[in-house]
Every structure is written in structure tokens, then in C-alpha cells.
Image (spheres, helix red, strand yellow):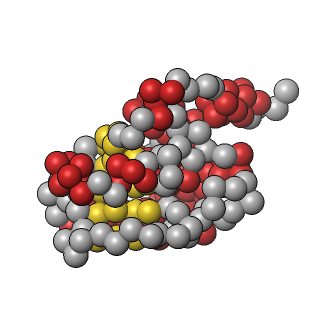
């Protein structure tokens, strides 16, 4: 057995567990202070957005039919929830956008959504956790799933998150070498 066997097995288990119907009810899940993961219905409900103080919305949908009021900044990632869809190309720019929103103003609140808040938007939030909290993919997935039980990235997105984890680890090693060389 290779050294990644157990981690890959745990990722597969986490992504295939069943959820109860109550988990699919429209709701915003607070993942970190000021960072929410939700479904389309919740993300387009102005009363909910106002109650939560949402200032920024990331829509991970192909056709963003909803137009947000001018006081809510909006980013759209046009991605289908399909294993062959490429979410990886959007991760760095989306994470930078979320990070900038949260760092710029302590009153900013970001909601990331797709249709169900289960695969596309969850993949973005998992990648955000990996990049900003320095968590492994498995820990990020389990953490986000602990906050929103229906989280289940499709197998293509999971593969891209594995690649993203490798990319983050390579960056970290490179930055460590640069820091050592600068001393």
C-alpha cells in the first residue's frame, strides 16, 4: 500500500456519505467568522443577506441570473457541476478576491454559493481553507463538512483539489527556500 492510501480512502468516505433531507433545506452555513457557504435560494434572499450582513457574494454557477444590489459586490465563476469542469483555474483568483474582501474591511462578510452549496461552492471554500488556514485537503474537507453536512465535491473537483494541495505545498516549500536564502 502506498503512503497516500489512507488519506485517499478517507477523502472518498467523506465525499460519499449520505445526508438527510433536512441537510438540504435552504440555509447559510458559517464556515469561518464572516465566511458563509450556501445554496442559490439563500444567496438570492435579500432578507437573509441583510440579516447576515453579507457584503460580497461569489456565485459558482454557469448562468448568474440574479442581479445583486449595488451595495453587494459580486464575483461569478461560470462552472458546471460536472467532473470534467475546470474549477482549478479559478481558485487562486477567487481566493484572492475573498481574502481581499475580508482583509479590506472588518465588517465585510462573504457568501459563496452554487445551486445546493454542496460541490462547486464547497470546493472553493475548501480551497480557501487550504490556502489561508494552511490545512490539508482532508482536514479542510472534514472541517467544512462539519459546518455543512451536505458538502460533497464531485470526483473531478476532488482531483483538482488534490492538485491544488500539491501546488500550495510546492509554493510553501519555495517560499521557505527563498526566506532561507534571504537570511
Name the residue rendered at 43%, 53% in the picture.
40
Between 140 and 74, which is closer to the camera in this rendering?
74
Q: Position of residue 168 (x, y in %)?
A: 55, 56
What's the residue at 35%, 40% (across, down)? Answer: 27
Q: Residue 80: in sight, yes or no?
A: yes
In-front residue for pair 53/169: 53
Q: Quadrant of residue 30?
A: top left
Q: Is residue 17 above or below residue 156?
A: above
Q: Quadrant of the C terminus?
A: bottom left
Residue 173 visible (yes or no):
no
Residue in view at x 52 percent, y 34 percent: 150
**Residue 154: x %, y % from top left:** 66, 46
Residue 125 pos. (x, y %)? 45, 50
Q: Nearer the viewer, residue 157 or 161?
A: 157
Q: Is residue 177 left or right of residue 96?
A: right
As rendered, which of 148 and 159 lies closer to the eye?
A: 148
From this viewpoint, which residue is outermost toward the right?
1
Q: Position of residue 64 (x, y in %)?
A: 46, 69
Instruction: Locate the N terminus by quadrant.
Output: top right
Question: As displayed, is residue 122 above or below residue 77?
Answer: above
Q: Quadrant of residue 16?
A: top right
For this view, does 118 lie left or right of residue 17? left
Q: Residue at x 40, y 47 (%)?
A: 38
Amino acid at each position: 500500500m502506498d503512503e497516500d492510501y489512507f488519506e485517499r480512502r478517507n477523502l472518498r468516505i467523506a465525499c460519499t456519505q449520505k445526508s438527510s433531507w433536512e441537510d438540504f433545506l435552504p440555509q447559510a452555513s458559517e464556515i469561518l467568522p464572516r465566511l458563509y457557504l450556501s445554496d442559490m435560494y439563500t444567496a438570492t434572499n435579500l432578507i437573509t443577506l441583510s440579516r447576515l450582513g453579507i457584503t460580497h457574494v461569489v456565485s459558482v454557477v454557469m448562468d448568474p441570473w440574479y442581479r445583486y444590489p449595488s451595495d453587494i459586490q459580486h464575483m461569478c465563476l461560470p462552472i458546471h457541476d460536472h467532473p470534467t469542469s475546470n474549477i482549478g483555474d479559478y481558485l487562486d483568483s477567487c481566493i484572492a478576491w475573498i481574502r481581499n474582501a475580508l482583509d479590506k474591511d472588518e465588517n465585510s462578510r462573504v457568501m459563496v454559493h452554487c445551486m445546493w452549496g454542496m460541490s462547486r461552492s464547497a470546493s472553493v471554500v475548501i480551497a480557501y481553507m487550504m490556502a489561508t488556514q494552511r490545512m490539508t485537503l482532508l482536514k479542510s474537507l472534514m472541517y467544512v463538512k462539519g459546518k455543512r453536512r451536505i458538502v460533497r465535491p464531485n470526483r473531478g473537483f476532488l482531483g483538482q483539489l488534490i492538485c491544488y494541495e500539491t501546488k500550495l505545498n510546492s509554493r510553501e516549500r519555495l517560499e521557505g527556500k527563498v526566506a532561507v536564502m534571504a537570511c
